[in-house]
Image (spheres, rainbow, N blue to C red):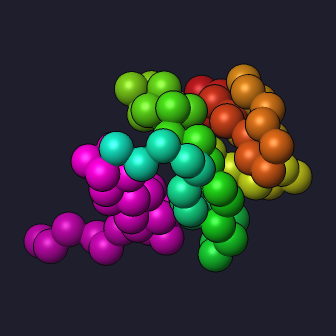
């Protein structure tokens, strides 16, 4: 049996990993466009500081979302202008 296609959220997460890798490889110092990783089918971009994304990625329960987008399934761990870092509650 074949594998199910990735969800929209999984696809956004993978695309963000590519964006993060490019920003780090180019030693990009400023904020860069990152897709909101909320649980909604969200097409919005946020301008995220590379340092914050690098600190988030080691923890698979943490996501970058636009303000107002966290769900009941997450708690805010860091607030920045224009985005939040949330941790999923399990």
Q: Is residue 70 above or below residue 12?
A: above
Task: Looking at the picture, tell me which residue is in the foreground, 53 or 5.
Answer: 53
The residue located at (78%, 37%) in the rendering is: 80
Where is residue 43 shown, x and y percent of the image?
Answer: 64, 75
Q: Quadrant of residue 40?
A: bottom right
Where is residue 30 shown, x and y percent of the image?
Answer: 55, 47
The residue located at (42%, 48%) in the rendering is: 28
Relative placement, left or right, of 58 versus 9 is: left
The residue located at (79%, 50%) in the rendering is: 82
> Residue reaching furthest right?
68
Q: Which residues are magenta?
A: 1-26
Q: Is residue 26 above or below residue 87?
A: below
| Visible residue check, residue 74 | no
Where is residue 79 shown, x and y percent of the image?
Answer: 79, 32
Q: Quadrant of the C terminus?
A: top right
Q: Main SS of the magenta segment?
A: helix
| Visible residue check, residue 69 | yes
Q: How many marks?
A: 0
Relative placement, left or right, of 17 versus 8 is: left
Where is residue 24 shown, x and y percent of the image?
Answer: 33, 44
Task: Looking at the picture, tell me which residue is in the foreground, 7 or 55.
Answer: 55
Residue 21 colored magenta? yes
Relative placement, left or right, of 23 versus 51 is: left
Q: Quadrant of the N terminus?
A: bottom left
The residue located at (48%, 26%) in the rendering is: 55
């Amino acid at each position: 049996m074949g594998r199910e296609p990735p969800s929209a959220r999984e696809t956004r997460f993978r695309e963000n990993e590519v964006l993060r890798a490019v920003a780090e490889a180019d030693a990009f110092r400023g904020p860069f466009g990152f897709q909101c990783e909320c649980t909604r089918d969200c097409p919005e971009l946020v301008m995220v500081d590379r340092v914050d994304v690098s600190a988030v990625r080691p923890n698979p329960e943490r996501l970058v979302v636009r303000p107002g987008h966290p769900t009941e399934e997450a708690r805010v761990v860091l607030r920045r202008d224009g985005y939040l870092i949330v941790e999923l509650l399990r």
